[in-house]
């Protein structure tokens, strides 16, 4: 068939493909022949649906355990989306406010979904079932989400994530391994009676400790705060988006966890330990940790009031003074 009989748009694409393959030393005809014999792509193959639906493997016969598994898998996928946006910001050479803002708005959207979706945990399971099947999960814990730790370390200068009592002893130049050993969440998995690390924490550090220390070092100069500083004359809107990110990650998200913990783990006159032995009563409430990604954007009064009861009332419409 002569070229004149081809749709000009098709011809144009063929010429573009020819240039593409030629520049990389590839034979376009071989690729076209492969396309000729290839099967059509299906939805279920593209997203690996059968594999995805086979990944829910409860450890007990309690029906609500499947809800627990699926919810945490969904959460990890949202974390992956957030990390993808943060990676784009980190790798951008010539930062513009428009680029930064677009990615930050996506991050906030994902956090909004995460925060609202936590109702699946405190509304979607029977308390009696949870308190039984949770015992088969030991010593695992949502505390062991390495992706969320990555999000924190990709967001802020790591010295702002150090436990409150050690924070003044660290700064931008502190060694990465020292910063890692003093991160605020380390205290969340310490046995109260002995002061020793729980098996939950030991297992987590064994699998992810090296990677997280490398993340601290790799993002020292390209975390969200450092990239924000590279934006020339950031607008009030961008500053507000950064503050919203700080609040959603460090107040609203842990308080969503806290509400669920109160629902399932609080029983008068004692509090039930979380899976993995994590100290949820001290670890989850924001006012105890005062983790703030971007303290330079907040007033002293705002930081003093970080995560106090008014925040709980504002978000949940109820008074959880125990936070």
Image (spheres, helix red, strand yellow):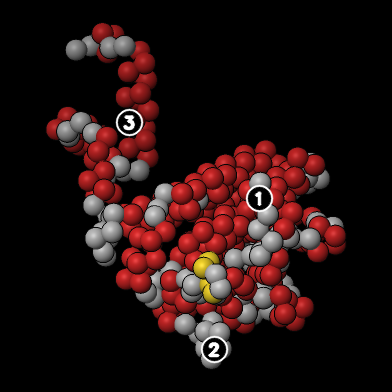
Q: Horizontally, is 238 left or right of 248 in the view?
A: right
Q: Nearer the viewer, mark 3 or mark 1?
A: 1
Q: Is residue 156 above or below residue 40?
A: below
| Residue 141, image x, y percentages | 43, 69
Q: Nearer the viewer, residue 42 or 99?
A: 42
| Residue 322, image x, y percentages | 66, 65
- Estimate how packed mark 3 is, as few (under 14), some (14 to 19) or many (20 or more) residues with alpha carbons within 10 Å: some
Q: Nearer the viewer, residue 131 or 161?
A: 131
> Toward which corner of the image does residue 103 lie, by quadrant?
top right
Using the numbered discs, state the Cα–Cα distance from disc 3 to disc 1 in whole angstroms: 64 Å
Using the numbered discs, state the Cα–Cα distance from disc 1 to disc 2 in whole angstroms: 33 Å
Can you name the residue that lies furthest to the bottom here? 194
| Residue 88, image x, y percentages | 55, 49
Quarter of the picture containing the C terminus is bottom right
Q: Which mark is residue 236?
A: none
Labelled pair 2, 3 in contact (Cβ < 8 Å)? no
Q: Which mark is residue 18?
A: 3
> Toward which corner of the image does residue 306 lie, by quadrant?
bottom right
Q: Which residue does the image show at 44% across and 75% down from the upper left?
A: 276
Quarter of the picture containing the N terminus is top left
């Amino acid at each position: 068939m002569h070229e004149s009989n081809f749709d000009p748009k098709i011809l144009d694409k063929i010429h573009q493909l020819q240039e593409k393959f030629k520049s990389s030393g590839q034979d376009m005809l071989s690729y076209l022949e492969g396309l000729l014999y290839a099967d059509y792509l299906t939805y279920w193959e593209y997203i690996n649906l059968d594999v995805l639906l086979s990944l829910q493997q409860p450890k007990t016969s309690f029906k609500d355990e499947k809800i627990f598994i699926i919810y945490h898998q969904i959460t990890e996928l949202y974390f992956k989306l957030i990390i993808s946006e943060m990676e784009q910001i980190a790798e951008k050479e010539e930062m513009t406010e428009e680029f930064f803002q677009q990615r930050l708005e996506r991050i906030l959207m994902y956090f909004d979904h995460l925060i609202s979706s936590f109702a699946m945990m405190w509304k979607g399971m029977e308390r009696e079932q949870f308190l039984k099947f949770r015992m088969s999960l030991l010593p695992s814990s949502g505390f062991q989400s390495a992706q969320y730790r990555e999000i924190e370390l990709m967001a802020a200068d790591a010295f702002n994530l150090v436990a409150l009592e050690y924070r003044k002893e660290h700064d931008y130049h502190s060694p990465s391994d020292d910063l890692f050993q003093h991160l605020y969440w380390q205290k969340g998995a310490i046995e109260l009676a002995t002061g020793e690390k729980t098996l939950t924490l030991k297992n987590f550090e064994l699998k992810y400790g090296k990677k997280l220390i490398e993340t601290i070092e790799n993002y020292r100069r390209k975390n969200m705060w450092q990239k924000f500083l590279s934006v020339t004359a950031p607008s009030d809107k961008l500053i507000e988006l950064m503050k919203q990110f700080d609040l959603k990650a460090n107040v609203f998200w842990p308080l969503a966890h806290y509400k669920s913990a109160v629902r399932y783990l609080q029983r008068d006159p004692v509090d039930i330990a979380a899976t993995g032995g994590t100290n949820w009563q001290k670890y989850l409430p924001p006012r105890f940790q005062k983790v703030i990604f971007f303290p330079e954007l907040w007033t002293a009064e705002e930081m003093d009031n970080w995560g106090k009861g008014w925040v709980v009332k504002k978000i949940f419409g109820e008074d959880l003074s125990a936070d």
